């Protein structure tokens, strides 16, 4: 099974069959970032952010298709407890779990879905990367704690930031205007170079 199979299974169970794969993928990616159990109402808010249809429908589809794993949490006699089945009996008092006052539903992605997302993301990444860079990427992954990323080559200008030359020219103007006193020769050399 794959992420695409999960999406098709859910799409086929809805009336209009218009659940977009991109929205499905983004929604699951959002839950993957959280990587822990969340209260049901918080999960419904996230679903609502991505979906125009009823978030309860999506929630039920995700539970019924084993995309979400549910944990029922409650308090009994000032003790925090959890259970996988809401109809189960409490070990402390014998009442049903869902009959306790402090009863809440918590949700997270199942391990299978997390694995499908990892596989899909890996395939997506490698389909867009030149194979000659794979050894470098593996080395970066191995030494990730020592890596500093520099983003450039067309990222800054579309976002409204100056390119390097304009950045340094602006910096030079500010430096000369405010007469910032620095002892760094490299700063002085850059400022003089851009005159």
Image (spheres, rainbow, N blue to C red):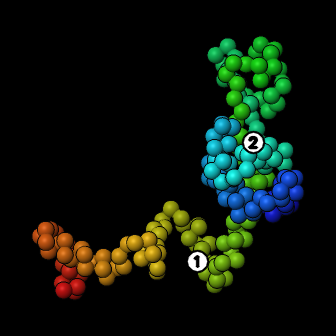
Q: Which quarter of the rendered picture does the C terminus lie within?
A: bottom left
Q: Which quarter of the rendered picture does the N terminus lie within?
A: bottom right
In the picture, measured across the screen, residue 182 lies left or right of residue 146, that is: left
Which is more toward the observer, 134 or 119? Answer: 119
In the picture, measured across the screen, residue 166 lies left or right of residue 119, that is: left
Please tell me in which quadrant of the rendered image residue 9 appears. Answer: bottom right
Residue shown at the point (66%, 72%) measured from the top left: 125
Instruction: Find residue 44 and report its horizontal and vertical position in percent.
Output: 68, 42
Residue shown at the point (59%, 67%) measured from the top left: 141
- The residue where tag 2 is placed is 56
Q: CA distance from mark 2 to mark 1?
A: 45 Å
- Residue 72 versus residue 14 in the image, above or below: above
Residue shown at the point (44%, 71%) measured from the top left: 159
Instruction: Find residue 186 and report its horizontal and vertical position in percent.
Output: 23, 78
Q: Secondary structure at mark 1?
A: helix
**Other-residue count near label 2 (Cα within 10 Å), few / some / many at <14 / 14–19 / ≥20:** few
- The residue where tag 1 is placed is 136
Residue shown at the point (75%, 63%) measured from the top left: 21
């Amino acid at each position: 099974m794959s992420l695409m199979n999960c999406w098709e299974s859910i799409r086929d169970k809805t009336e209009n069959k218009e659940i977009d794969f991109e929205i499905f993928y983004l929604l699951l990616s959002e839950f993957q970032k959280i990587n822990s159990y969340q209260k049901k109402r918080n999960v419904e808010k996230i679903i609502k952010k991505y979906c125009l249809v009823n978030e309860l429908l999506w929630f039920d589809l995700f539970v019924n298709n084993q995309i979400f794993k549910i944990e029922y949490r409650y308090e009994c006699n000032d003790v925090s407890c959890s259970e996988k089945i809401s109809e189960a009996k409490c070990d402390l008092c014998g009442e049903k779990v869902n009959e306790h006052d402090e009863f809440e539903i918590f949700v997270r992605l199942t391990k299978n879905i997390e694995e499908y997302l990892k596989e899909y993301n890996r395939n997506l990444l490698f389909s867009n990367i030149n194979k000659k860079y794979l050894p470098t990427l593996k080395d970066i992954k191995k030494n990730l704690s020592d890596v500093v990323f520099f983003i450039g080559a067309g990222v800054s200008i579309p976002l409204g930031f100056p390119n390097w030359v304009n950045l340094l020219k602006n910096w030079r103007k500010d430096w000369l205007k405010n007469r910032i006193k620095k002892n760094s020769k490299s700063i002085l050399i850059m400022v003089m170079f851009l005159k």
